Image (cartoon, rainbow, N blue to C red):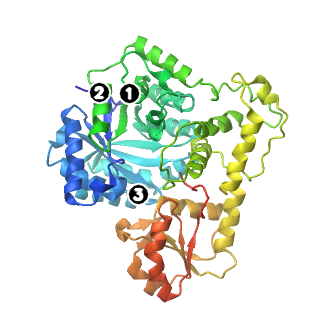
Amino acid sequence: MIAQRPLGQTGISLSVLGAGTTRFLSADLRDSEGLDRCAALLARAVRYGVNYIDNAFSYAEGHSEEIVARLLRLVPRESVHLAVKSNSGSDPTADDVLRRVESGLRRTGAEYFDFLYLWSVLDAEQLAFLLRPGGPYEGALEAKKRGWVRHLLVSSHAPARDAAQIVDCGAFEGILLSYNLMSRAETGPVIDRAAARGMGVLIMNPLGGGILPQNETLFSGARLPGDASTAEAALRFAASRAGVTCVLAGLAGTRDLDQAIHAFDGWEPDDAERNAREKAASSAASLPGLCTGCGYCRPVCPLGLPIPEWMQSYHQKLLRLPRELYGLTEPEEIERAAVLGRLIQGFSLLPASGESPCIGCGKCASVCTQHLPIPQRIAELYTMIRTAHASEADRRERLSTLLRGHGFRRVAFWPASGTTSFVLREYRRFFGEPDFEPLFFDSSPAAGTLDGQPVYGPADLTRLRPDCVLVASFRFRKAIREAVEPLLRPLGIPLLCLHQDGDAPWVF
């Protein structure tokens, strides 16, 4: 059976392995029989001792809560701990959070949720937005008061300095963090900080989004005797950090479940194994060609540039990457998106422009313990930034070109998502309040509201007559264009796309 560990000071014990619901096969999400297969897979995990199911309204292409409802017909409610998640983009007010929780209860058939996550907090600014009067945190407290949820947690992809503020704010009983062999140096201290405050810690992305098992040989140094694979070593590494309660594994099918069960069935590390895994992980991170994050280059740079962060972002170029990423399938575009995703989201370093600030003095390379060609790699990195239009200057120019100087009175943003909220925040950061009225549209307007404004559906286009429709999504931009363009053509409404071919996403 799978061991259990206490989740901070909540009084709840979770299995070391938790079941994620984001990686079910698309083929299993098309009909009732497929959804039953997904529920049966989760039920099998529960029988092995997994007692935490990580779900959210948008997971599994919007079917996650329905799958959980089917799961609850197969296993007793008290055998599993369930979560509901609320994102500040779609649920910016206290009332929005309450509606989200109420909807989750209705769709799953559960009488309560064990955990409510304020979900995907990216930085300290977003944390302040959550905690403001009338904001999402007030709604979370009210949901707990009503007995709809029992514990308040937070999920974060924030860089370490902002994640530390999230931990220190004292508002949450637990935190869900991304932690794996590649991010140990940044995230490890945040885990330690959270554990020291008595918070429960759950881990997502223990396999680095699939990168670790796809680079089996490269990361094989992380394996200890008894590890069946690099993937198993990576799962056990994540669970070996002191303070970690539960490690999530996304389940596409029985193979994923069997692999995760094999890693954790009857397994619990002692101090000797914890130390051995940390030592092996450090060795794996010190492979030829990879930056170890030692930081010796930092004080010698005359411009104080973030060289370790740049080099660790460049790592993605050296790894074997998935065949599909953010909807991209061309290897060069996948590589570029992986590198820039690590830079912009992982390290919160949005380049000011596509022009490299590096003067090529070479002082960094002269002290590099791994003898890396740092100036050359910086030059390559900035070539990617220019090619993918991935700088602050590029974003400003793109928004100005698309939305300013055209006399637009109403601009429809499609879809109603956190990406759209982010795009509007960027617009306000660059130009102040827009001189047009933003309208939010979605093919599934049941989303309700976004940023406190109603979400409209395709049937509302004729009545509202926006001056243009801007597709904000990166991954689904082509599908949205194909679906929406025929609706706009008879109305004479132009369709604009935020992202162009060759771009990197704005939100990773």
Mark 2 → mark 3, Cα distance in angstroms: 42 Å
Residue 431 in sight from this viewpoint: no
Please name the residue shown 52% across and 63% down the image: 420
Toward the top, the furthest residue is: 272
Q: What element does badge 1 sit on?
A: helix
The answer to whether the residue labelled 3 contacts the one labelled 1, judged by CB atoms less than 8 Å apart, is: no
The residue carrying mark 2 is 262
Q: Secondary structure at mark 3?
A: helix
Where's the N terminus, which quadrant? top left
Q: Is label 2 in a helix, a strand or a loop? A: helix
Q: Position of residue 115 (x, y in %)?
A: 32, 43
- Give the residue at x 36% y 37%: 248
Q: Earlier in the sequence, mark 2 or mark 1?
A: 1
- Which badge, 3 or 1, comes first in the chain's sequence? 3
Left or right, residue 146 beside residue 297: left
- Please state the horizontal and vertical placement of residue 69, each as a whole percent of the image: 21, 52
| Residue 167 appears in the picture as rendered | yes
Q: Which residue is mark 1?
A: 232
Residue flagged by tag 1: what amino acid is it? Glu
For the point 39% across and 53% down, the residue is 86
Q: Amino acid at mark 3?
A: Ala
Q: Are marks 2 and 1 in contact (CB under 8 Å)?
A: yes
Crowding at mark 1 (Cα within 10 Å: few <14, some 14-19, many 20+): many
Specify few, some or many for label 2: CA neighbours under 10 Å numbering under 14, 14-19, or 20 or more: some
> Please, what is the three-letter code of the amino acid marked with disc 2?
His
* C-alpha span from label 2 to label 1: 8 Å
Seen in the image, is 354 located left or right of residue 57? right
Q: Is residue 115 left or right of residue 206?
A: left
Residue visible at 45% across and 76% down in the picture: 484
Residue 482's place in the image compared with 44, above or below, is below
Q: Which numbered circle lies on residue 94?
A: 3
